[in-house]
Image (cartoon, rainbow, N blue to C red):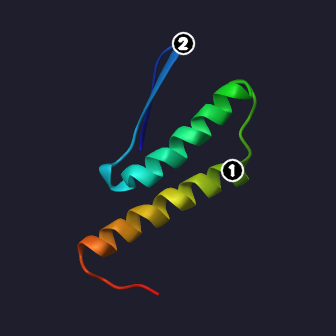
């Protein structure tokens, strides 16, 4: 993940393609929630951990499927 602050009004966030569509949907929903609730409010560490956990889980599942690795 790469986060870049362009100026006072714009921040760019880039993610690996391994995130997949489901991961992108989760990220988009979280970002929209942050925007709606005010950009100046601090996001709790618990929420950050949940988002990163979901992204990692989805990325590993996609990678394992690509490699034909079955997980339980």
Q: Percent from the top left, x then y, of residue 32?
A: 60, 32
Judge whether 12 appears above or below 25 on screen: above
* Earlier residue among tags 1 and 2: 2
Judge whether 51 appears above or below 32 on screen: below
Q: Which residue is drawn at 30% across and 83% down?
A: 69
Q: Which of 35 and 3 is in front in this view?
A: 35
Q: Percent from the top left, x then y, of residue 60?
A: 39, 68
Q: In which quarter of the image is residue 37?
A: top right
**Left or right side of 58 for 41:** right
Q: Tag 2's secondary structure?
A: loop
Find disc 2 in the rendering and name its residue: 9
Q: Which residue is drawn at 32% across and 75% down?
A: 64
Q: Do the residues labelled 1 and 2 touch (CB within 8 Å)?
A: no
Find disc 1 in the rendering and name its residue: 47
Q: Distance between the residues labelled 1 and 2?
A: 23 Å
Binning the other alpha carbons within 10 Å of mark 1 as few (below 14), some (14 to 19) or many (20 upward) gives few
Q: Which residue is drawn at 52% across and 44% down?
A: 27
Quarter holding the N terminus?
Answer: top left
């Amino acid at each position: 993940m790469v986060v870049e602050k362009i100026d006072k009004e714009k921040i760019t966030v880039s993610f690996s393609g391994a995130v997949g569509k489901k991961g992108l949907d989760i990220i988009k929903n979280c970002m929209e929630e942050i925007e709606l609730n005010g950009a100046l409010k601090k996001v709790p560490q618990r929420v950050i951990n949940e988002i990163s956990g979901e992204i990692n889980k989805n990325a590993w599942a996609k990678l394992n499927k690509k490699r034909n690795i079955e997980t339980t």
